[in-house]
Amino acid sequence: MQLDIVTGASLDDLAIEFEGGRSETVLNLDITARSSRTLIPYAEVVTLQDQIGSMLEEEGVHFDKLALNLVVIRVTQLDPGVPPTATPTSVIILTPTAVATVIGTPFPSEP
């Protein structure tokens, strides 16, 4: 499939549905993909839709319109050969002399 070539994402699920009306047939593709990218630009999704449509037409699938719904699940992939590095974290130490003060506006009383 063109999905990995165009967007760099991998296919997770695919649902195909034809909607046939009197005047036109719409092919609905619902694609769920996994990607380490934060965002797949709209232009890449349009390119994917065009390429899938061309490929289906070449294979003899007939439709008037192609509707593509792409859901991308962001994943983090760790390399099993490279262990994760330690990340420094901040630590707050409270001593017995530390005092917490809450400052706020009281709720108005009900009549």
Image (tube, rainbow, N blue to C red):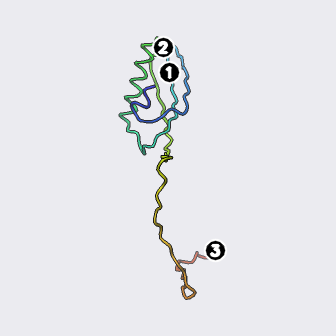
Amino acid type, residue under disc 3 in the picture: Glu
Residue at the disc numbered 3: 110
Position of 27 relative to 42 (above/below): above
Lateral position of residue 30 relative to residue 110, left or right: left
Q: Earlier in the sequence, mark 1 or mark 3?
A: 1
Residue 61 numbered mark, or none: 2
**Residue 7 image position (x, y, % from top left):** 40, 34
Q: Residues within 10 Å of mark 2 (few under 14, many from 20)?
A: few
Q: Residues within 10 Å of mark 1 (few under 14, many from 20)?
A: many
Q: Residue at x 54, y 34 (%)?
A: 12
Q: Secondary structure at mark 1?
A: strand
Position of 15 relative to 34 (above/below): above
Task: Judge by depth and name the residue closer to the eye, 88 or 81.
Answer: 81
User: Which image quadrant for residue 97?
Assistant: bottom right
Position of 76 relative to 7 (above/below): below
Q: Residues within 10 Å of mark 3 (few under 14, many from 20)?
A: few
